[in-house]
Amino acid sequence: MDMPTPNPEVLAKKARIVARLQEVLPADAVISDEAETRAYECDALTAYRCPPLAAVLPASTEEVVAVLKVCHEEDVPVVPRGAGTSLAGGSMPTADSIILGVARMTEVLETDYENRFIRVQTGRTNLSVSGAVEEDGFFYAPDPSSQLACAIAGNIAMNSGGAHCLKYGVTTNNLMGVTMVTMEGEVFEIGGAHLDAGGLDLLGVICGSEGQLGVVTEATLRILHKPEGARPVLMGFDSNEVAGQCVSDIIKSGILPVAIEFMDRPCIRATEAFAGAGYPDCEALLIVEVEGSDQEIEAQLERILAIARTHNPVELRESTSAEESARIWLGRKSAFGAMGQINDYMCLDGTIPVSQLPYVLRRIGELSKDYGLDVGNVFHAGDGNMHPLILFDANKPGDLERCEAFGADILRLCVEVGGCLTGEHGVGIEKRDLMVDQYAPEDLDIQMAVKDVFDPKWLLNPAKVFPLAASEPRRMAAE
Amino acid sequence: MMTPANEAALAEIVAGAQTALRIQGGGTRAIGAPSDATVLSTSALSGVTLYEPGALTIVAGAGTPIAEIEATLAAEGQRLAFEPMDHRGLLGTDGVPTIGGAVAANVSGPRRIQAGACRDSLLGVRFVDGAGRVLKNGGRVMKNVTGYDLVKLMGGSWGTLGVLSEVSLKVQAVSEAVGCVLLHGLDDQQAVKAMSAALGSPSDVSGAAHAPVGVDGTPVTMIRIEGLEASVAYRVEKLTALLADFGAEVVVERDAEKVAAGWSWVRDVALFQGGTGDVWRLSVKPTDGPGVVAAIKQSQPEAQVLYDWGGGLIWVQVSEGSDVRAAVGQGHATLIRAAEATRARVPVFHPEPAALANLSARLRKKFDPRGILNPGLMG
Ligand SMILES: Cc1cc2nc3c(=O)[nH]c(=O)nc-3n(C[C@H](O)[C@H](O)[C@@H](O)COP(=O)(O)OP(=O)(O)OC[C@H]3O[C@@H](n4cnc5c(N)ncnc54)[C@H](O)[C@@H]3O)c2cc1C
Ligand SMILES: Cc1cc2nc3c(=O)[nH]c(=O)nc-3n(C[C@H](O)[C@H](O)[C@H](O)COP(=O)(O)OP(=O)(O)OC[C@H]3O[C@@H](n4cnc5c(N)ncnc54)[C@H](O)[C@@H]3O)c2cc1C
């Protein structure tokens, strides 16, 4: 993976930059020792690593302002970081950059049940936002599988989704306001407890901007009352086509399950060997979950099962207890771990129109043979967000490169059938150079023009999202 | 008036424009300060280009009449989740509202509190920027984080960043059953509390409105439930029990046509149709609503109001030429209906803090370097 050459002038003045940061932050909030900065050398895309010049851990919006002012004056690139669980290399540093971590900013600032929002500092983890309101029956809906670790900061920057977003939407649909500091150190309050923007929808463009427009320090999030209950059913089919058709028929019937998850045979076999959830050995498996009171659940499941039966399932398993529900979810939840048990894997997340599911799975199967690498598919079928997991051996020379080439082919395929490169993980460095397959040069130019407005010097997370060649003139002009 | 027949012609017109353009969907009257700019109509960029009911997505030209979209969806038992209002009654105009206009104005009705705003249903856009470039962002799939989300930015940009040529939207199924719990006689404060209680319950409320002066002249608070018959029956009962504490007379309406008529009345602000005076639309924190209304009534005792969105959206009718913005703390107020003289004097959109206004202005400059798209409308 190409990264820009570190700016030698910045490297040369490390001591001065660190000293200036120490002036504005408590001593233990500036990390410059080479052994310690290693902790920040990568995120969950571990194939690429580079320790930063230094890392800072501010505890408040004011401290973030102070840090950014110093970095802006010194022309130092800044890479914002939440919990470092990005799968796209979104928070990977460059050698001439400062990591600005929000891990110390975890406070709940306001909880308001009447108006149904919570305001938090963005270093708070996704799960502990729900945790803060759980006792009162509420929850924060977007639930990425990484929710135990990932921070709201990263969720906002990546516009993260979760298993239940078919019903509740992704981060952007649940974000009401932010406090954001620009690279110049200016603080903006955008949105809040009221709905919709008075002027341009800046909140909409900040969410999903991958830490390139500003550092988000506080967020107002919509909270909802928990449903009375939830129950999954498991369905096995003897072809991907039929499973895909079943998904489409359920959606067309007017019932909106909270989740429709899909696993193909390689993935079913791997999870069976790993977790022993008792899944049937079949081509394709669906887990459909509905929510509500007992009566409501019964009524929805009755319809869903009737639809499933018209597709001759090889298995239909209803849950009658919390234990059975847990067992149905067990395999799905351990899918990544199971694949990881077999080998190293790369997780993609292209999205496709649901109608293209059978075709895309067939093509992935063919490509898998061409490349000689196994792939398992597990994904959110209701919204077409795929997660092909390509298995490779990191210790085998050339395997990673082959895996990346395979991955790129799959993502191009997603775009070809009317989908996109990434549904929830973000572009980061990983898909940066594929952006030209989805967007024409002028489409990328207008996006970069937005960054010009928020960060004229291109110091915030500069080497991400856009192909390096496309962003080079802007990054150079800034230096 | 110029009416390009396709996107390429639209791009040519914008690129070659020597003067300001006023972008028009089906609107029959200028929004904001009166302007003598050349009208550019999108009405010929019309037609549904792709509709996949099994994927809940529709793609259409920006000039497609909303009515045509709704009819296409209805044939498959689907609808636009955001329930766009029809402004014609309120404004006394008779154009043909277009989907591009609804997107450009981020028009969202009562279901906004449950299903999101128009921008939340918007999956992708094609548009022509002020330099005449044809651009796209987003696509037609439900989850897409590829690059910056300019889709949201274009939604609600009122034609100041570009002329939309095509939009793709997420749609939803029409619910099988519907019910409405009506509370009679609550004052504004109690009504907002009751709506908060309903919205804060597991009942998945899809509409919560309060009219201090309802159709029969007395206060009415309306809570809507949509879903499968079994769900609606169950939740209506639950809500009735939950709201009993407020001491109001509770009536349950299960007749689908009557419920629909009631919510159209809210959605299209029928209360102020044919009325005199200016109409403002306020977005505030729901529990701030009654206080904001009380403040407006201090100087405008005759003011009439309608609360939607659980109290967070307030429609206010005041005497001509008055500015209600001072009463709004956190939130914003848009001037929807007023005489030309007022619109020339009072900005339509809520003035933003200087730094934010500056940021927005610099953004507009990138999209429209010559300042020819609806100039002056948003600042
Ligand atoms: C202050 C105010 C005044 C309003 N006045 C009217 C009115 O007089 N008549 C009426 O029918 N509705 C009016 N509306 C409501 C709203 O604009 C309409 O309901 C709209 O959503 C219906 O579509 P339309 O085609 O009529 O839009 P229009 O009223 O024609 O346009 C609405 C806005 O969107 C822009 N726009 C329209 N199409 C595009 C496009 N393809 N690309 C980019 N921008 C576009 C216009 O420039 C305008 O700023 C008003 C709303 C407000 C807030
Ligand atoms: C096992 C596993 C499962 C996952 N499952 C899902 C899933 O189901 N759905 C999903 O969407 N994602 C998933 N992810 C991806 C990842 O967890 C999300 O992208 C998450 O939102 C990243 O959050 P973070 O706090 O770890 O951010 P980081 O990795 O630290 O950073 C992510 C991005 O956010 C930016 N950023 C961080 N803090 C700020 C800030 N304060 N202001 C501005 N920008 C900032 C960074 O610069 C970077 O670009 C998964 C990851 C793993 C490892």
Image (cartoon, coloured by chain):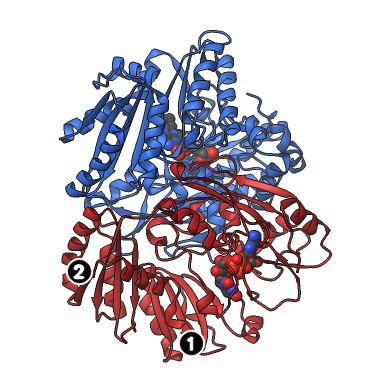
Chain colours: A blue, B red
Q: What residue appears at the point 25 percent right and 18 percent down from the top-left corner?
A: A276
**Dot 2: element:** helix
Residue situated in front as seen by the camera: B255 or B227: B255
Q: Nearer the viewer, mark 2 or mark 1?
A: 1
Locate residue A38, reporting x and y percent.
51, 26
Q: State the image coordinates of residue B331 (x, y, percent, origin top left).
A: 47, 69
Q: According to the image, label 1 marks what residue? A: B275
First of labels 2, 1 by sequence position: 2
Q: SS class of the residue under badge 1?
A: loop
Q: Quadrant of the C terminus of chain B?
A: bottom right
Is residue A195 shown to the viewer in this render? yes
The residue depicted at 62 percent of the width and 57 percent of the height is B62
Q: Nearer the viewer, residue B99 or B327?
A: B99
Compared with residue A50, is residue A112 higher up or lower down, i.e. above or below? below
The disc placed on residue B171 is none
B251 lies left or right of B129: left
Query: What chain letter is assigned to the residue under label 1?
Result: B
Label 2 sits on residue: B243
* Residue at x 30%, y 37% (from the top left corner): A307
| Residue B191 vertical position relative to residue B237 in the rendered view, above or below | below
On screen, residue B309 versus residue A322, left or right, reads right
Q: Amino acid at mark 1?
A: Gly
From this view, report whether residue A25 is shown above or below residue A361.
below
Q: In the image, what residue type sits under mark 2?
A: Leu
Rendering quarter of residue A144:
top left
Q: Residues within 10 Å of mark 1 (few under 14, many from 20)?
A: few
| Residue A445 locus on image (x, y percent) | 71, 44
Mark 2 to mark 1 CA distance (whole Å): 33 Å
| CA neighbours of label 2 inside 10 A, class few (<14), some (14 to 19), many (20+) | many
Q: Chain of mark 2?
A: B
